[in-house]
Amino acid sequence: MIKAIIDYCARNKAIVLIATMFAVIGAIYSIKKIPLDAIPDLSDTQVILYSEWMGRSPDLVEDQVTYPIVTALLSAPHVSAVRGYSMFGMSFVYVVFDEGTDIYWARSRVLEYMKQFEGKLPQGVTPTIGPDATSVGWVYQYALVDSSGKHDLSELRTFQDFNLRYALSSVPGVAEVASIGGYQKQYQVEVDPIKLRAYGLSIGDVTRAIRASNNDVGGRVIEMTGREYYVRGRGYIKDLNALREISLGASPTGTPILLDNVAKISFGSEIRRGVGELDGTGEAVGGIVIMRFGENALDVIQRVKQKIAEVKPSFPEGVELKAVYDRSNLIDRSIHTLKHSLIEEGIVVALVIIIFLLHFGSSLVPIIVLPIAVALAFIPMHLLGINSNIMSLGGIAIAIGAMVDASIVMVENAHKRLEKAPPGASRKEVIIAACKEVGPSIFFAQLIITVGFLPIFALTGQAGKMFTPLAYTKTFAMFFAAILAVTLAPALMTIFLRGKIHSESKHPVSRFLIALYKPFVFVALRNPKTTVAIGIAAIIATLPMIPKIGSEFMPPLNEGDVLYMPTTFPN
């Protein structure tokens, strides 16, 4: 069958070239659509639940909030682990699902189970589900810098919370925009306990009065002169005066007791548990952009930058946005380095082919087949949703050396057959016969190399997520190299194998290397026992070094950014 394919492709060059052209177009489309990232996403499928119960100690939060949530979610389907973390006033529960679980199916299961424990939690505690992101979703961070000095940290935080954050949250692919630093503006009521006692009131009375007063009341409608008018009581607090005029009750004489009579009312800032600094120059306000699960990091960052440019005219006077972390820089550097290495490798392979074949037309066959096979590997990558990253492109880099072998062997065999062909023999028929002679063996040899990485697909967990893309791309590249070796290569050989073919005996480079290699071969063949003994001794000599070699999951990746997050004791 392989011989028939070779014969057909060699005699129908136009069909093969047209089919290859359409395949390359599909490959180019796939390359443009494949998401780019630095490394594979190694994070688990997890859902985060956040609960706030401010003012309570960690042990109380653990008993009353974290424990009921954890125990309820342990029985959820496909849950592999539930981890709870309790701290002052806050609870975090991480629900880790089995590998391969759809993130949105997992989130819907957690939402269903939330109804089981909501009634068991203290009054006022409502768990909030985290964004649909992964642990590597932190793709962009920025700081707001006021060069004019007209705006304090409270004003910058207000602009971040109520303007910029919502604008960036609307960007497709953004799961959340978290605010950091500055002061969160709030109304503050400082109650005087002595005055409160003098009026016979309690803190609870003040709290209830404020809560009841901060509300709009709707009535029905009244009809006047053929028109309907809505009846409503407008009571939302909009300024300090509205707070001051809240009635807490009446004195024995019937005089209203206002909040202003028992408390000091002012603007203030919420208690902070941390600060944000920029380059050691002082406190700053900023935001962190979290990417949604499964999105293209480069596209999301680009859209965020476009949105920032759109809303920049609305920034307060003198306020500028400074990017302090941008993962696109790391992705661009990583992919550029790997692409540069691939190009260098391709150039070296091409030069070696030209030098050893010493026939420009013959050299074009493997030089053309190699990049096409690499490009075609991106089609199944796109269909299977495999990102383009260091590991996936590394698989192609590993495969390049073996991919080019098939075309070289076929070209060299054609050279041999052309050297021995009788005068007047059809060059095309000799080339086809040469391809059919070694084509089937080459095809199956390439497939055997292809299956060499199949055991990697058995890896699970983080190791599987890290190395599976490499195995996929190497397998795809080798598979397409085997296909092109028996389809495109014979067609190209009938086109480019023209002119004088130099025999190996007249090739200067080959003669030099053979002369250099021949003495070693003669010595090894004349002394087989000594040669084997030297090899065994070399292996034994390396054994003591093996335990001393360190091991790690992956080498350190220097992003070029420093994020300093110290944790201090209170005060």
Image (cartoon, rainbow, N blue to C red):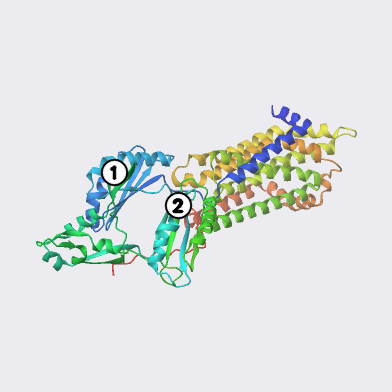
Q: Residue at x 15, y 67 (%)?
A: 195
Residue 38's spot in the image, x, y percent? 53, 53
Locate residue 379: give its quadrant: top right
Compared to 335, does 562 lie above or below?
A: below
- Type of amino acid at the residue the image marks with label 2: Ser
| Residue at the spot of label 1 | 222
Q: Who is closer to the viewer here, 187 or 378?
A: 187
Q: Residue at x 75, y 29 (%)?
A: 8
Spot the residue most to the left. 252
Q: Who is closer to the viewer here, 236 or 313?
A: 236
- Type of amino acid at the residue the image marks with label 1: Ile
498 with respect to 217 (left or right)? right
Residue at mark 2 to residue at mark 1: CA–CA distance:
42 Å
Residue 116's spot in the image, x, y percent? 26, 40
Residue 404's spot in the image, x, y percent? 69, 44
Residue 566's spot in the image, x, y percent? 37, 65
Locate residue 422: give its quadrant: top right
Count neighbours of disc 1 (C-alpha within 10 A) and say few if under 14, some if 14 to 19, many if 20 or more: few
| Residue at the spot of label 2 | 169
Compared to 441, does 348 lie above or below?
A: below
Q: Nearer the viewer, mark 2 or mark 1?
A: 1
Q: Residue at x 78, y 30 (%)?
A: 11
